[in-house]
Image (spheres, rainbow, N blue to C red):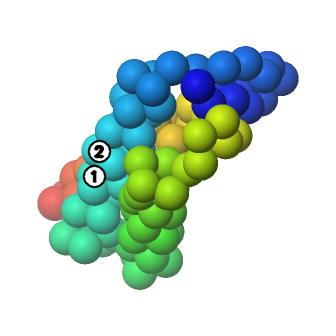
Amino acid sequence: MHHALVPLAVGEISDGTLLAYSLGLIVSGLLMLVVGATGFPKQTSNARIIDVVAGVAFLGYAIYLLFFLAEGGTVFILYYVFVLPIFLIYRAFQSMRSARS
């Protein structure tokens, strides 16, 4: 079992939950990297850098959780990692839509 540190809550999580959270981080990280690397039209270079940095951070934390976390270690579960990619992908499509007009 691993200790989960969710904002305002502390508890234990199963290995399955840890795996699901790690896979969610991987998917979010890959989405962020694709959005940052493809450079949607009219997406500023700063926005692309933010996308890539967030993607690398998500992937890095997932790799840490999957391969380097010691048994009984503490896991920080941050749910914004699933909201941030949706927001940034929406913003990228919004910039693409404005480039067409």
Type of the residue with mark 2: Val
Q: Specify few, some or many for label 1: CA neighbours under 10 Å numbering under 14, 14-19, or 20 or more.
A: some
Give residue 12's position: percent from left, percent from top: 66, 20
Is residue 46 shown to the viewer in this render? yes
Give residue 66's position: percent from left, percent from top: 42, 48
Give residue 9's position: percent from left, percent from top: 79, 20
The image quadrant of residue 44 is bottom left
Relative to residue 58, is residue 50 depicted above or below? below
Q: Which residue is mark 2?
A: 27
Residue 31 has which mark? Answer: 1
Q: Residue at x 51, y 42 (%)?
A: 81
Which of 68/4 is in front?
68
Left or right for 14, reference 6: left
Q: Residue at x 67, y 29 (%)?
A: 4
Determine the secondary structure under disc 2. helix
Which of 9/101 is in front?
9
Q: Residue at x 45, y 76 (%)?
A: 49
Give residue 64's position: percent from left, percent from top: 49, 57
Type of the residue with mark 1: Leu
Check contact, mark 2 vs mark 1: CB within 8 A: yes
Q: In the image, which is nearer the foreground, mark 2 or mark 1?
A: 2
Relative to residue 40, is residue 73 depicted above or below? above
Is residue 78 shown to the viewer in this render? no
